Amino acid sequence: MNLLTTTGLTRRYSGLVAVDHVDLDIPEGGIHAVIGPNGAGKTTLFNLVSGLVMPSEGKITFAGTDITHMPSHRRAALGLARTFQNIRIFGAMTVLENVLTGAHPRLHASLGAVIFRLPSFRAEEREAVARARAALELVGLADRADLPASGLAYGDQRRLEIARAMAPQPRLLLLDEPAAGMNPAETVALADLVRTIAKTGTTVLLVEHDMGFVMGLSDTVAVLNFGRRIFTGTPAGVRADPAVIEAYLGSRLAAKLQAQMEAQHGR
Amino acid sequence: MMIPDWLDDFIWTYQNLIHALGVNGLLALAMYVVLAVGQLSLGQAAFMGLGAYSSALMTLKLHLPFYLVLPASCVVPVTFALAIGVPTLRLSGVYLAIATIGLGEVLRAVYINVDLFGGALGLNGIPDIAETWMIYSLLALAIAALWLVGRSRIGRAMEAIREDSFAAAAMGVDVGRYQLGALVTSAVLAGVAGALSAHVSSFIGPNEYGFEPAVTILSYALLGGIGNPLAPVAGAWFLTLLPELLRDLPEIRLAVNGIIIVIVVLFLPRGLLGWRMKRRAA
């Protein structure tokens, strides 16, 4: 059974179809990517899946549950976590408190247990802190746990977002352009981190427009262009697909490239 | 318990001020819980009025004992908080602020025009059966409870909502539930504050719970800060004591009052007690 399925998923804004009848099947396990040029509808697709935007049409199923109209916070409770393209950490909180907030779906202490500091609350809080520290360890921020999050460098803020999303040990992690704004060394380290996360059993679905980052990393790739899914398959298949090349480079450049490649092969 | 004579004299001389400090502290906390989830409400004075009028009527007409009146004084404010919060909290922005300003003005008109509430003269002869220790015990309890709640998943969720409600929702925080919960808590605190103040002053009138007190309560929290529950109380005490300290300078009292507030807002943007409490308990 697929972990995440979208069927005919559509989101219209006045005069614009941002996501146009997209069908996706993301199996449990592994690393999966949605790529496409800027404005292809990738972030809207993520917002639909995570519940920040409601679909105009279509259906979303997560782990066998229809989540099409479910509010965001209930999706998180089912094991759906995400990061944001434009970093959205809680800047005034410490690094560790950010990650603890991410663990919210796993914490259930009642108001009474909190006020009277019952043993159940204390045990839960201790365990949450331990898990949060483990998540910070995973992304390499353990030594900065008590700093204010707004003081972290850009790349570290991205890592913090990943740690915060991983804190509840989600079934599916959505990474929205995780490599955006990173230098090549940071990108390589990020790719290693994503592989480590996939090994912990969390399925990763990432959105990128940097094709290079995705190719060496992903088990499957879907390509969006103008809101439509124009390709789905393996990374190797993407490179050879004329529709994808055209989407990325424009039709004229693609034709030129095609001609060059043919000329090379001819020689 | 023996109270030394000098303290007894002091309390007797300043009892109005001592009561006002406690009641205003509770009102500042009522403001704080709403600001803590990133909402702006100007309904705390209205909630206070509902608590004051409903409790005064329970005492005067129903002759209920105060230990029943005090807890019951939050029933009416909470009802109004739910009636206003459920529709407006779905909308982002200033809708709650506008609706709560409206509530205050509508209630003022009702108090003036309905005989039950004593019209423009208000309600007189309320027995002064609230005690100073009740006010300060409740204030201490409220601060302690908000402190403990602040250092838990609930406090983290509240701060997350204030910083970025979309990100908070994606982290599994039920934003609407927390915001409604905060408004209801605010109504409880303000309602109880109203009941206490009505039962120490023997008189309440329709103009005590209008727009101006609403803004004053907001300025308690803005001046003190909202990083921890002691801060708004400090703001309330500062703004309650300041006019008393300037009593010898009647001509420039209002000007000095205003200048001090401007200075604090400019140079201490996080408030008098600007530090932020920790958000974890382990």
Image (tube, grey):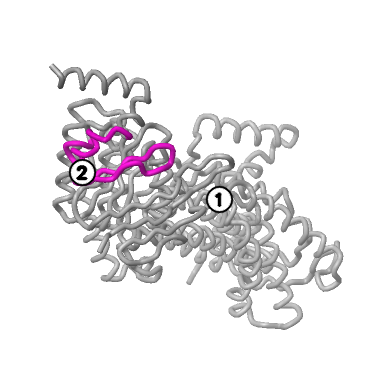
Vertical placement of A261 versus B234: above or below?
above
Q: Which residues are magenta?
A: A214-243
Q: Is residue B10 visible?
A: no
Q: CA distance from mark 2 to mark 1?
A: 47 Å
Q: Which chain's residue wears label 1?
A: B
Measured as percent of width and height from the top left, residue A39 is found at 43, 34
The residue lying at 43 percent from left, 41 percent from top is A227
Closer to viewer: mark 2 or mark 1: 2
Vertical placement of B106 versus A216: above or below?
below
Other-residue count near label 2 (Cα within 10 Å), few / some / many at <14 / 14–19 / ≥20 = some
Share a chain, discs 2 and 1?
Answer: no
Measured as percent of width and height from the top left, residue A104 is found at 34, 58
- Callout 1: SS: loop
Measured as percent of width and height from the top left, residue A69 is found at 47, 61
The residue lying at 40 percent from left, 55 percent from top is B157
Q: Amino acid at mark 1?
A: Gln
Other-residue count near label 1 (Cα within 10 Å), few / some / many at <14 / 14–19 / ≥20 = many
In-image side of B123 versus B194 (left or right): right
- Callout 2: SS: loop
**Residue that mark 2 sits on:** A234
| Front residue (pair A248, A51) | A248
Quarter holding the C terminus of chain B is bottom left
In-image side of B46 versus B173 (left or right): right
Assess whether residue A234 is covered by the magenta stretch: yes
**Residue that mark 1 sits on:** B39
Q: Which chain's residue wears label 2?
A: A
In-image side of A149 versus B252 (left or right): left
Q: What number is the disc on residue B207?
A: none
